[in-house]
Image (spheres, rainbow, N blue to C red):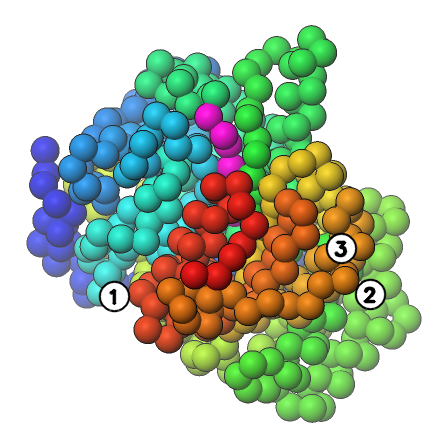
């Protein structure tokens, strides 16, 4: 067995000359961020670089590979859950560093749609973090497995190391596959004891759709199991976290206009560009009308056209020369470091059991979603359902993120209609401190919390502020929510 992952710096040295420019989670299509291809790619079956016999309905696992998590005595496992003979979801599990038997189980899902959850693992809050040269990793003291058993899943099929027939094109279809995967996961003797533990779903970006949709579906399936109409193991869903999420486009798209004009740092574009975008949003038949028509009809073509129009006329032009994920940098920002060289190392892949070439985002999966218009659908009613069901929920964002900026997210949050709405609206923002340092602004109402985190870009846990360490504020947020508490200052 290879020892620490620094070994891979030596194995990868010959690849350095081919180091890729930092890839993007959300594809740029014909110059449009989040655009819609005129001729989308058809679904395909992924090429598997290391063929292995699938085991439908079961896991295939490599235990304790020694990669990433090097804390003595902490269990890890990576591999595949085979949904069918030609659909396999990749997972990487890390036991909690403390009290894994009783610690909650959390799944982490990146967005896209089509982005790999290895982004969250290696760039944000996993047990290790990618180094700036993209060739090795270092142990992360602010890993979320400090307090929870963490399960990172590449989904839908075709994303990241997952492979198979790529047919999923809606958040609902994705939810059904992840439910199936979790049934397989909990049926495995290595993980069956975790089925009784508290369960959390944390996600970001397109997770504004994934989080509410998946959580609501899990609750629906649990109800079916309870009344005998569904066969399976209930998921003990207690927590939902949604970071920098696209949930309610009609509420959120005006945020691009206001954020481009005024944010905590600097304007992004000229007044004339802002005025042009505002006209594209408000005019008859413009972005606002097209999103509303999507909401009213649910038509795939109407919703897909709304995505194309609004991202071409609103989202893309208003960022100007800045990076859409972190406006304190010019585009493209090389941080967080690219993962392609590290995760593309064939020795590494063999050690962890990966069978297909890794990519940050699957264009095929993205195109599947663009064809259905899922982007412009409204997930806010599902989020309201989850909150009202008693699931402790937090919505969070970084104040230096443009692509799902806090203006839009806070507009969505203010439009929520839940049992806590009246209380939430009566509150003013409170200062949120971490180790005595200003770290954000927060509101808590019942079991719902919102926080805007200072100095953070789109991947909140990848950043720092003041003299805090990288991911320190994000770990405090995560730890407080996962201990079934509202946010509080330290």
**Residue beneath disc 2:** 288
**Residue beneath disc 1:** 132
Q: Nearer the viewer, mark 2 or mark 3?
A: 3
* Image spot of residue 234 (x, y percent): 57, 19
What residue span does the magenta drawing correspond to?
A: 197-203
Q: Quadrant of residue 443?
A: bottom right
Q: Is residue 256 found left or right of 122 in the rendered image?
A: right
Please report the residue visible at 69 percent of the width from the left and 42 percent of the height from the top.
387
* Image vertical order of residue 69 relative to residue 28, above or below: above
Q: Residue 171 bears which disc, if any?
A: none
* Local SS, label 3: helix
* Residue 281 makes an appearance in the image: yes
| Number of other residues with Cα within 10 Å of mark 3, as a class: few under 14, some 14 to 19, many 20 or more | few
N-terminal label among 3 and 1: 1
Q: CA distance from mark 2 to mark 3?
A: 29 Å
The residue lying toward the viewer, choosing from 335 and 369, is 335
Please report the residue visible at 48 percent of the width from the left and 61 percent of the height from the top.
489
Can residue 426 be found in the magenta stretch? no
* Image vertical order of residue 311 relative to residue 444, above or below: below
Please report the residue visible at 61 percent of the width from the left and 11 percent of the height from the top.
231
The residue lying toward the viewer, choosing from 421 and 357, is 421
**Residue beneath disc 3:** 423
**Image quadrant containing the N terminus:** top left
Name the dominant secondary structure of the magenta segment.
strand
């Amino acid at each position: 067995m290879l020892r620490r992952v620094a070994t891979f710096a030596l194995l990868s040295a010959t690849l350095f000359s081919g180091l890729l420019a930092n890839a993007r989670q959300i594809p740029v299509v014909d110059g449009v961020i989040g655009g819609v291809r005129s001729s989308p790619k058809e679904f395909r079956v992924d090429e598997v670089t290391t063929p292995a016999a699938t085991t439908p309905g079961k896991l295939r696992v490599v235990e304790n590979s020694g990669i990433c998590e090097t804390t003595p005595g902490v269990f890890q496992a990576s591999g595949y859950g085979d949904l069918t003979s030609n659909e396999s979801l990749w997972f990487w599990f890390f036991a909690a560093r403390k009290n894994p038997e009783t610690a909650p189980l959390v799944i982490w899902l990146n967005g896209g749609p089509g982005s790999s959850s290895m982004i969250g693992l290696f760039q944000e809050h996993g047990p290790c973090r990618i180094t700036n040269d993209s060739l090795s990793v270092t142990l992360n003291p602010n890993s979320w497995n400090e307090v929870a058993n963490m399960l990172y899943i590449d989904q839908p099929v075709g994303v990241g190391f997952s492979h198979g027939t790529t047919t999923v094109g809606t958040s609902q279809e994705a939810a059904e596959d992840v439910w199936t995967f979790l049934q397989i996961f909990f049926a495995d003797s290595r993980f069956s004891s975790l089925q009784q533990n508290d369960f959390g779903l944390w996600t970001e970006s397109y997770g504004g759709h994934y989080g509410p949709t998946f959580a609501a579906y899990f609750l629906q399936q649990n109800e079916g199991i309870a009344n005998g109409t569904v066969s399976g193991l209930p998921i003990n869903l207690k927590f939902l976290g949604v970071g920098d999420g696209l949930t309610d486009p009609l509420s959120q798209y005006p945020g691009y206009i206001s954020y481009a004009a005024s944010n905590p740092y600097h304007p992004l574009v000229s007044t004339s560009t802002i005025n042009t975008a505002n006209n594209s949003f408000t005019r008859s038949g413009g972005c606002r009308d097209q999103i509303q028509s999507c909401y009213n009809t649910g038509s795939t073509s109407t919703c897909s056209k709304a995505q194309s129009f609004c991202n071409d006329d609103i989202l893309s032009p208003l960022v100007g020369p800045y990076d859409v994920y972190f406006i304190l940098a010019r585009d493209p920002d090389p941080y967080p470091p690219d993962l392609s060289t590290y995760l593309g190392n064939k020795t590494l892949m063999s050690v962890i059991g990966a069978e297909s070439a890794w990519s940050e985002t699957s264009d095929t999966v993205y195109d599947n979603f663009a064809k259905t218009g899922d982007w412009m659908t409204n997930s806010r009613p599902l989020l309201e359902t989850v909150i009202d069901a008693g699931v402790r929920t937090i919505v969070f964002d970084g104040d230096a993120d443009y692509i799902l900026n806090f203006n839009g997210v806070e507009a969505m949050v203010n439009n929520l209609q839940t049992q806590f709405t009246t209380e939430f609206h009566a509150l003013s923002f409170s200062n949120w401190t971490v180790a005595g340092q200003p770290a954000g602004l927060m509101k808590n109402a019942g079991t719902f919390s919102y926080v805007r985190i200072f100095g953070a870009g789109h991947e909140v846990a990848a950043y720092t502020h003041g003299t805090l360490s990288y991911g320190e504020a994000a770990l405090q947020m995560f730890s407080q929510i996962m201990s079934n508490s509202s946010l509080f200052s330290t």
